[in-house]
Image (spheres, rainbow, N blue to C red):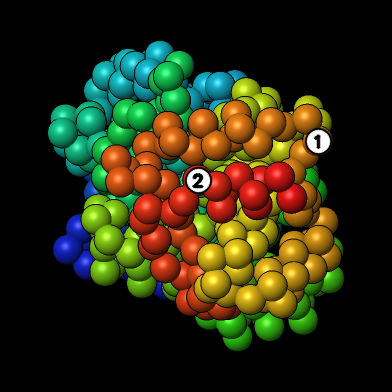
Amino acid sequence: STLHTVRVGGEAGHYDIAIGPGLLDDAPRFARELRGRHALIVSDAHVAPLYADRVEATLRTARPGVQVARFVIPAGEREKTLARFLECLDALAALGATRDAAVVALGGGVVGDLAGFAAACWMRGIDVLQLPTTLLAMVDSSVGGKTGVDLPQGKNLVGAFHPPRAVIADTATLRTLPERERRAGLAEVVKYGAIFEASFLDWLEHHAQALLRGDDAALSEAIARSCRYKAEVVARDPYEHGDRALLNFGHTFGHAIEAEQGYAGAGSRALNHGEAVAVGMVLAARLSAALGRGSEADAQRLRALLARLGLPTDLPAGLDPQALLARMRLDKKAEAAGLRFILWDGVGEARIVSGVPEDAVLAVLQG
Ligand code: NAD
Ligand code: ZN
């Protein structure tokens, strides 16, 4: 089996991302990343019963005498709240966590964002080890240091930049991930090909079946390549003043779709984040073509790949284009000058474009 390591560097600090099956049992690796005598495992009600005992055993082997506690939230985006954040701080206080304590975030992006934010704030910042267990968390949320929680007024409105001490992605945990969640993560993987490198899109086209099957080698390779792209951008632009925003390809449309649907959770018929981003990327590619940038052929190629991966590529019926446009005006990435989109000039060539005319956006939304 293959182990991949990706180093993230830059002004905000250095850390390693390790990717491979069985890493949750790799005590020597955990020993290198743990400093103090306290560790708080933060997880959710789906993931903790599957993996928390193993992580706790590994922590005890890595650091004999360590005091370990757990903070487990119910699963789902609705739990990424200030209330849960405060409970997490309470758990750190009850543990007697000192400045060299570690928060161990075991789960998907919800757990990673919440736990990372608690680590950013406890005593003005302690270590967080990210142990992502969803494909989305492995290729996106665990890397790059963005942490935070939602408010009733909107997603991710409160947070901090707090890079992890390390990311340890045990790809064997993906075997228990519901298939729909795996496909949602693949949308973010396709995003990296679309914005950074045509040859990665070729590779994805060749490995679509293996990725859908959950083939270990294909998934590990896709995760490692995705992390490399993200690491490069994050190193150049850790605080998103510039081209880190390219990672939002498909997300202006995607966020509007999610918001219009009311952030309905998985299991419902509403699109989840990755699915909304898949539709959003197709819309962004079509908008690019309409504005004389990328070609219709490239937009079709992107749509075909997403469809092969079992992802939606059309706006769900019943969403009102005018309402979606209004959501995009309110997006926190919007500017006074007009709508800002990540568009492409072709596969692998994404650009940040300001002042996009609303009538062009509306035309794309209307099909
Ligand atoms: P999630 O954390 O809700 O996980 C999805 C579901 O899968 C949950 O029900 C979870 O309990 C379950 N699950 C997780 N791992 C499992 C496993 N191995 N086996 C079985 N079930 C498992 O959602 P997500 O898609 O991982 O993350 C979405 C969140 O990530 C959003 O809140 C989003 O804002 C955030 N995000 C953050 C960043 C960032 O840079 N910080 C980037 C992208 C997304
Ligand atoms: Zn995303």
- Check disc 2 and give the amino acid type: Glu
Give the amino acid type for the residue marked by disc 1 in the picture. Answer: Ala
Name the residue beneath numbered marker 2.
358
Residue designated by label 1: 317
The residue positioned 83% from the left and 65% from the top of the image is: 308
Residue 292: give x, y in percent of width and height.
55, 72
Badge 2 residue CB within 8 Å of ligand 2 = no
Viewer-nearest of discs 2 and 1: 2
Relative image position of residue 299 (x, y in whole percent)? 68, 69
Q: Secondary structure at mark 1?
A: loop
Asked if residue 268 can be seen in this view, the reply is yes
- In this rendering, the answer to whether 185 lies above or below 74 is below
Q: Is residue 227 above or below residue 123?
A: below
The picture quadrant where one finds residue 323 is top right
Q: Is residue 194 left or right of residue 97?
A: right
The residue lying at 17 percent from left, 63 percent from top is: 11
- Give me the C-alpha separation between circle 2 and circle 1: 21 Å
The 10 Å Cα crowd at callout 2, few under 14, some 14 to 19, many 20 or more, is few
Tell me, yes or no, if residue 115 can be seen here.
Answer: no
